[in-house]
Image (cartoon, rainbow, N blue to C red):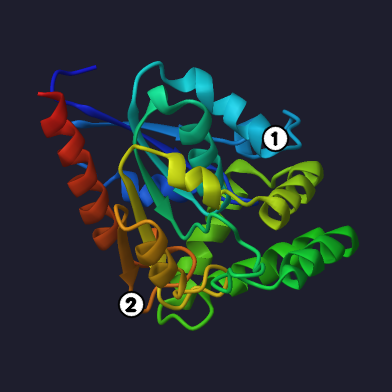
Amino acid sequence: MKPGSVTCVFVHGWAMNNAVWDDCIKLLPDWINVIVVDLPGHGSMAMVEADTLDDYVQSLVPLVHRPVLWIGWSLGGLAVLRLAELYPQRVAAAMLVATNPCFVSRQGWDCAVDESVFKQFALDLECNQQKTIRRFLALQVKGIDNVMNVVRQLQHSIQSRGMASASALSSGLEILLDTDLRQALSAIDCPVHWLLGAKDSLVPAELAIALKEEYAQHDVTVVSNAGHAPFISHPELFVEQLVRHAQQLRISQL
């Protein structure tokens, strides 16, 4: 690795693969060393079985042996958070995109979706996998301006690397439904940066208020007119934020 460079590891979300990052990565400066990940059951790892969030984490651990910047989108953000909890020596900072430490609303946690959303996805998967993925893509872009552009990019990522396995889709929904990392988040010492969409149908923008109240040390940015994939709908803003966080690490390493 070049002196002065910063390594960034990108972790995709449910039903996707590492191709979702392609356009953003093209915009990064050459001093950022990029590692893109396919979670078990997705993309190039479609034949690898994984049932739990900790299984995902174990697939990430061997990628680096020193603290780096991790970027996790949605389900991938949960994996990054859990990695930071279990292996803090590998996480210099975390950038969490359209992620919620607890995706499902619970008592005292209203900045999340009702559990019926993910339960319905699980039921629909059993009947028609393709239709369920299309519905999921539609939710990701609901309410934003450049709907077709974002949908095309998400569809391209699936088509170029292949559909996630049926078992990975099912277990991923269970992880989104059952995981609650709010307490773990309080114990994580590294810098945590949140990038949320103001029109996200899966991670309500109200999460920003809760994060600022509960985790005042965290950096929270809400992108107006962005849905669940702000790095696709607003790539320049996403890259600007990422480079800023990477630059902070770069300075600290000098």
Is 100 above or below relative to 115?
above
Circle 1 SS class: loop
Report if residue 210 is visible in the image: yes
Quadrant position of the C terminus in the picture? top left
Q: Position of residue 249 (x, y in %)?
A: 20, 34
Q: Eyeballing the image, is 12 above or below 56?
A: below
Mark 1 Cα-neighbour bin, 10 Å: few <14, some 14–19, many ≥20: many
Query: Is 117 left or right of 183, judged from the image as shown?
Result: right
Left or right placement of residue 254 versus residue 100 in this view: left
Q: Residues within 10 Å of mark 2 (few under 14, many from 20)?
A: some
Q: Nearer the viewer, residue 28 or 102?
A: 102
Amino acid carrying mark 2 in the image: Ser
User: Judging from the image, what secondary structure is the residue with disc 2 in?
Assistant: loop
Image position, residue 177 (x, y; %): 71, 57
Query: Where on the picture, by quarter, is residue 201?
Result: bottom right
Q: Residue at x 60, y 74 (%)?
A: 138
Residue 128 seen: no
How many numbered discs, if any?
2
Left or right of residue 12: residue 146: left
User: Circles 2 and 1: CB distance less than 8 Å?
Assistant: no
Which one is in front, 212 or 10? 212
Calculate the distance from the C-alpha at mark 2 to the C-alpha at mark 1: 34 Å
Q: Residue furthest right?
A: 127
- The residue under label 2 is 224
Which percent across, then down, holds residue 248? Answer: 16, 40
> Of callouts 2 and 1, which one flags the residue occurring earlier in the amino acid sequence?
1
Amino acid carrying mark 1 in the image? Ala
Say which residue appears at 54% left-offset and 72% top-offset: 111
- Point out which mark residue 46 bears: 1
